[in-house]
Image (spheres, rainbow, N blue to C red):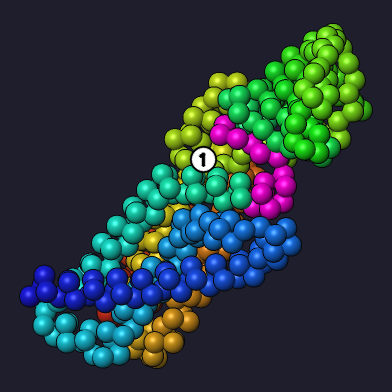
């Protein structure tokens, strides 16, 4: 009988979760669609890029919406069961609250693991492609290729960093050091209107000298329309470049949302060895781990709140109470992370502190569920 009951509650919960997750994701995508579609249309982008952009956005949206979907699914499932007096019937059959809600907690744990795995293996790839479509194809920003540079001004390495400059020259950079504002092993191509190369610069270093870029140890090749060219070697040469150092930093850096946990952890270790400040990235690292498991926290919180509030109102009342508590949790979680970035909290406490606090509150409300008082009175 217990197994049959678990399957029944689990089926109800999964049905509500799928509807809640689909609705939340759909609302987010629709709102984002109306914000982005004008830019795609204005630049005459193909519909395939527009569709690919939103498909690639789904994993990151799922990551952020999964806890809220679990909260809604838990509330609706229990409120409907209570409305139909099924909770009372189960209790009359000798089944306690734990037995009734165990499938919900178990399913929330599985959802948290799936979201965690998706954010580790699928979301970084999808986010990188999404950013490429929007930032490069739509907005015309430089391409940052298949290599990473951390946002704390580390070296970029990989040999496949390409971007189109403001003067339409095509740059290929091997190394870029934002701290010293130095580019090493660069190739720059200038083209005729028909696409053929009219000038090519191969240079060992490009260094920023307060007001301009100095090209050091390289050679300049100039070609005519027929492909015939001349070569000029130089030790130091000033060549007009419209980009400032900030342009290079802004457009070449790949952000942590495009990194998996393993890649982010590797960056933190390398930065630590170099003596650089890793606070921001340690907070983001713990945030990436803790956020999926908010699903379990909100489920533990929603169970007693839903059962309590169902005694005094209907489904909408239950949803309202739980959404208010979910808002309070989200506010404290965001504030904790912000304080972690500011150094007021340790990265571990910033990411996990609110979850521990509200999990404790959820367990307390469960233990006092059959009491008429929020704080049980001690008998004499």
Q: Percent from the top left, x then y, of residue 191? A: 79, 32
Does residue 200 appear in this view? no
Does residue 137 appear anywhere in the picture? Answer: yes
Residue 143 shown in magenta: yes
Q: Nearer the viewer, residue 210 or 300?
A: 210
Q: Is residue 64 above or below residue 260?
A: below
Residue bearing mark 1? 259
What is the quadrant of residue 380 in the picture?
Answer: bottom left
Is residue 286 found left or right of 34 in the rendered image? left
> Residue 96 placed where, x, y %?
18, 75
Q: Residue at x 70, y 36 (%)?
A: 163
Q: Main secondary structure of the magenta part?
A: loop
Name the side, left or right, on which 18 lies relative to 256: left
Region in magenta: 134-147
**Secondary structure type for disc 1:** loop
Q: Is residue 376 depicted above or below 87 in this figure?
A: above
Q: Residue at x 39, y 90 (%)?
A: 314
Horizontal side of 363 relative to 129 (left or right) equals left
Per the image, is 200 magenta?
A: no
Report the residue that reaches farthest toward the left: 1
| Residue 121 position in % (x across, y down) | 41, 44
Expressed as whole percent of the image width and height from the top left, the position of residue 129 reads 55, 47
Of residues 277 and 141, the one nearer the viewer is 141
């Amino acid at each position: 009988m217990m197994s049959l009951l678990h399957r029944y509650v689990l089926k109800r919960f999964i049905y509500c979760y799928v509807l809640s997750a689909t609705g939340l994701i759909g609302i987010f995508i629709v709102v984002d669609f109306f914000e982005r579609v004008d830019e795609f249309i204005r630049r005459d982008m193909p519909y395939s890029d527009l569709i690919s952009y939103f498909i690639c956005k789904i994993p990151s949206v799922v990551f952020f919406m999964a806890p809220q979907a679990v909260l809604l699914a838990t509330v609706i499932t229990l409120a409907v069961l209570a409305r139909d007096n099924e909770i009372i019937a189960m209790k009359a059959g000798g089944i306690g609250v734990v037995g009734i809600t165990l499938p919900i907690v178990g399913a929330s744990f599985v959802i948290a693991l799936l979201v965690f795995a998706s954010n580790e293996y699928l979301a970084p790839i999808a986010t990188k492609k999404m950013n490429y479509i929007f930032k490069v194809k739509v907005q015309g920003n430089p391409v940052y290729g298949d290599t990473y540079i951390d946002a704390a001004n580390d070296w970029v390495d990989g040999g496949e960093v390409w971007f189109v400059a403001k003067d339409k020259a095509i740059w290929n950079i091997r190394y870029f050091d934002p701290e010293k504002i130095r580019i090493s092993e660069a190739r720059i191509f200038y083209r005729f209107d028909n696409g053929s190369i009219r000038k090519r610069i191969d240079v060992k270093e490009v260094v920023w000298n307060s007001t301009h870029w100095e090209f050091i140890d390289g050679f300049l090749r100039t070609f005519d329309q027929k492909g015939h060219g001349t070569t000029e070697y130089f030790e130091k040469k000033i060549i007009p470049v419209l980009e400032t150092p900030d342009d290079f930093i802004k457009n070449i850096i790949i952000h942590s949302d495009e990194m998996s946990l393993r890649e982010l952890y590797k960056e933190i270790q390398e930065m630590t060895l170099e003596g650089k400040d890793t606070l921001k990235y340690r907070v983001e690292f713990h945030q990436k781990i803790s956020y999926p498991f908010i699903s379990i926290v909100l489920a533990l919180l929603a169970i007693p709140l839903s059962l309590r509030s169902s005694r005094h109102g209907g489904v909408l009342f239950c949803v309202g109470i739980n959404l208010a508590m979910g808002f309070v949790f989200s506010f404290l979680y965001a504030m904790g992370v912000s304080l972690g970035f500011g150094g007021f909290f340790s990265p571990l406490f910033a990411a996990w502190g609110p979850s521990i606090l509200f999990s404790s509150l959820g367990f307390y409300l469960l233990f006092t569920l059959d009491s008429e008082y929020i704080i049980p009175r001690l008998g004499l």
